[in-house]
Structures are given as structure tokens and as C-alpha cells.
Amino acid sequence: MKKVLTSIAIMICSFSFGQTVNGYKLNEIPADYIEIVGTSKLLKPMQVSIYVDYGQIARYKDISKGHVIGEDGKKAPFNGMLGVLNVFSKNGWELDQTLMLTVGGANVAHFILKRKK
């Protein structure tokens, strides 16, 4: 049982620090400012889908370049926008500005983060 708990703890820690955007680790994104856009999932309102824009998204079809990918190669799940902020804070980012919009009846959060000094 002790080995199982230790294995789970290691997996959780490595997951939170092994996430990437467009091949860059979260703490190595080549920008001083980034925008995180988040929307609630339809059937899971406490979870959010996000994408990160640091200037790499030129067209709407490039939006997949902004997905946060976990070590398993899948889009990383987040429990709310505060969960997103906590992960990015641990990776050297801090909140600069926020904007909430309603698009088609859905709330869309836009967070501008800047690199911590």
C-alpha cells in the first residue's frame, strides 16, 4: 500500500510539472506575456477547457498549438480557472489582467499572465 501511494504521489507531481504548450514546458514558453482562454466543459461545469496563446496561434485552425498537453500526450484536465492559475504560478507566471466575456450564453475567461521576476 505504501508503494502504491508513493507511486501515485510521484505521478501527480510529475504531471503538474511535465505539461507543455506547443512543445515548450510551461516555465520555458518563449514570451513575457501569455493569454489563457478558458471555457467550462458542457457536461462537466466544474472543469475547464483552455488554450494558451503566446503569439503562436495565427489562424483558428492552429488553436491546437495552444493546448496544454500532459506527459501522457493528452490535453491536460483542469478543475476550474483557479486550478489553471495555480499550475502556471508554480511554473513562473503571475496574473496580470482578467476579462470575462459571454459568448453564445457561455462564459469565457481571458487571463493575461506575465512572467514572474
Image (spheres, rainbow, N blue to C red):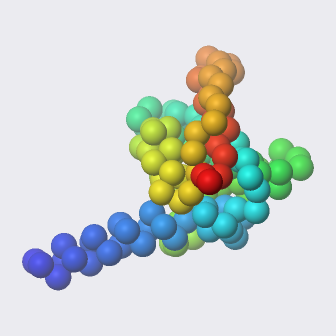
- Asked if residue 18 is positioned above or below residue 91 in the image, the reply reads below
- The residue positioned 32% from the left and 75% from the top of the image is 10
Q: Residue furthest bottom?
A: 3
Q: Residue furthest right?
A: 58
How many labels sit on residues? 0
- Front-most of 27 and 18? 27
Q: Quadrant of the N terminus?
A: bottom left
Question: Left or right of 86: which side holds 27?
Answer: right
Residue 78 drawn at (x, y percent): 47, 48
Q: Residue furthest front?
A: 117
User: Residue 66: which quarter of the image?
Assistant: bottom right
Q: Position of residue 16 (x, y in %)?
A: 45, 63
At horizontal 51% and vertical 70% (from top left) the residue drawn is 18
Quarter of the rendering occupied by the C terminus: bottom right
Q: Quadrant of residue 106?
A: top right
x then y, percent, for residue 100: 62, 23
Q: Is residue 4 above or below residue 34?
A: below
Which residue is at a point 35% across and 66% down the rendered structure image? Answer: 12
Is residue 81 placed above or below 32 in the rendered structure?
above
Is any atom of residue 78 visible in this view? Answer: no
Of 96 and 77, the residue lying toward us: 96
Q: Answer whether residue 109 is visible to the viewer in this image.
A: yes
Task: Give the residue displayed 26% in from the left and 78% down from the top.
Answer: 7
Toward the left, the furthest residue is 1
Q: Nearer the viewer, residue 99 or 11?
A: 99
* In the depicted structure, whether residue 39 falls above or below residue 9: above
